[in-house]
Image: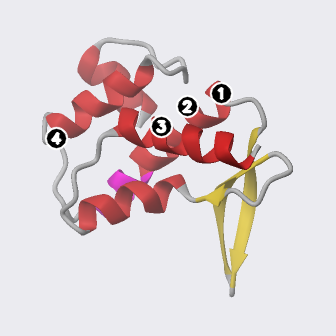
C-alpha cells in the first residue's frame, strides 16, 4: 500500500498522523472495488502503522485464532485490543463510511478512558 500511495500521489508515507489524509484520499477517490478484501485490509494495516507511531504504548502483537495468525494491536497494560485490518474491511463490507481521522480519534478516546 505504501508504494502504491507514493506512486499515485507522489508523496512519501511517513507513518505519522498527517498520512491519514493521504489514506483517506485514496479511499475517497474510489480507487478500489468494494470486494477487494486484501486491498482494504492493506489500508487497515497501513492505518495500524500510524496508530503505533502516534500512540505511545500501542504495539503490534500476533493474534492466534484456531490455525490462523494475524497482526493485531494492543495498548500497554490495558484490555484494549484491535485488528485494524478487520476494522477497515468490516466498514467497507458493511457499506459504512470509513473516516480514518474519526476512527483515530475514537480509538484514542477509548484508550484514554481506560487509563
**Does the stretch in magenta take in 68?**
no
Residue at disc 4, secondary structure: loop
Magenta range:
36-41
Residue at figure coordinates x 47%, y 37% from the top left: 104
Side (left or right) of 25 relative to 66: left
For disc 1, the marked residue is 53
Q: Looking at the image, which residue sits at the far top?
A: 11
The reply to whether dot 1 and dot 2 touch (C-beta < 8 Å) is yes
Q: Is 70 or 28 nearer to us in this picture?
A: 28
Q: Is residue 95 left or right of residue 58?
A: left
- Assess disc 2: are there few (<14), some (14-19) or many (≥20) residues with their C-alpha within 10 Å of its C-alpha: many
Give the labeled residue for mark 4.
31
Disc with the residue nearer the chain's start (4 vs 1):
4
Q: Residues within 10 Å of mark 3 (few under 14, many from 20)?
A: some
Q: CA distance from mark 4 to mark 1?
A: 26 Å
Where residue 21 sits in the image (x, y, percent)? 33, 23
- Between disc 4 and disc 2, whose residue precedes? 4
Could you say which quadrant of the image residue 78 lies in?
bottom right
Discs 3, 2 touching: Cβ within 8 Å: yes
2 w.r.t. 107: above or below: above
Real-space Cα distance between discs 1 and 2? Answer: 5 Å
Residue at label 3? 104
Q: Sequence-wise, which precedes: disc 3 or disc 4?
A: 4
Q: Nearer the viewer, mark 3 or mark 2?
A: 3
Spatial separation of the CA atoms under disc 3 and disc 1: 12 Å
Q: CA distance from mark 3 to mark 2?
A: 9 Å
**Residue bearing the label numbered 2:** 50
The reply to whether discs 3 and 4 touch (Cβ–Cβ < 8 Å) is no
Amino acid at each position: 500500500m505504501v508504494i502504491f500511495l507514493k506512486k499515485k500521489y507522489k508523496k512519501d508515507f511517513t507513518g505519522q498522523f498527517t498520512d491519514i489524509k493521504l489514506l483517506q484520499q485514496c479511499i475517497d477517490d474510489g480507487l478500489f472495488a468494494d470486494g477487494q478484501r486484501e486491498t482494504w485490509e492493506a489500508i487497515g494495516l497501513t492505518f495500524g502503522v500510524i496508530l503505533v507511531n502516534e500512540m505511545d504504548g500501542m504495539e503490534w502483537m500476533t493474534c492466534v485464532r484456531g490455525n490462523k495468525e494475524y497482526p493485531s494491536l494492543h495498548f500497554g497494560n490495558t484490555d484494549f485490543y484491535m485488528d485494524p485490518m478487520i476494522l477497515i474491511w468490516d466498514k467497507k463490507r458493511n457499506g459504512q463510511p470509513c473516516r480514518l481521522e474519526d476512527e483515530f480519534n475514537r480509538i484514542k478516546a477509548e484508550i484514554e478512558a481506560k487509563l
